[in-house]
Image (cartoon, grey):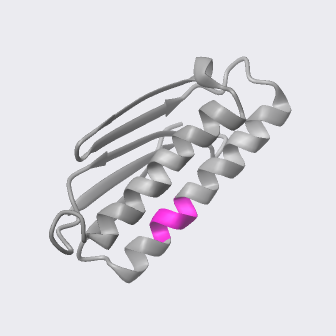
Amino acid sequence: MINIKMTIDSNNRIIKVESKGHGEYDDSGKDIVCSAVSVYLINTINTLTEILKISNSIEYSVDYGLYNLVIDYNNMPEETIRQTVLIMNSLKLALSSIEENYNEYISVEYEEVR
């Protein structure tokens, strides 16, 4: 199972995403759940680094079955914060949709920090 944990700050912004595990929906290369999750997670990093150009405000790692992303909103211009929040909310929506349809293969949990 893919276990995803999203940490949300007191401003209702996603500040951390951790993903561990595999969907085990099908064999490697045919697992649509793992593929979908991987595409969304990696696309989010690419969007943040290549389009928003905020590499200096994020830390991330991607490995087989492991994904971590941490966002530091401090020192970001207000417009960049707004765009980052939008992108992260899009990721949240996408992962929630996958979980809704394939909940035996993926679990998304949320932790609020104040």
- Depth order, front residue of 96/60: 60
**Is residue 109 in view?**
no
Query: Picture quarter containing residue 1?
Result: bottom left
Residue 81 point in image, percent of width and height: 74, 35
**Which percent across, then down, holds residue 107?**
31, 64
Viewer-proximal residue among 36 and 12: 36
Question: Which stretch did the figure color magenta?
Answer: 92-96
**Image quarter in which the C terminus is found:** top right
What secondary structure is the magenta-colored segment mainly? helix
Q: Farthest residue toward the front? A: 29
Is 52 placed left or right of 63 in the picture? right
- Residue at the outermost right position: 79
Q: Residue at x 46, y 64 (%)?
A: 95
In the rendered image, residue 93 lying in the magenta stretch gets the answer yes
Q: Is residue 70 left or right of residue 34?
A: right
Residue under the point 56% across and 39% down? 46
Left or right? Give the position of 103 relative to 113: left
Marks counted in the figure total 0
Relative vertical location of residue 30 with respect to residue 81 in this rendering, above or below: below
Q: Residue at x 72, y 34 (%)?
A: 52
- Compared to residue 36, the image places residue 45 above or below, namely above
Residue shown at 60%/49% (left/top)? Answer: 88
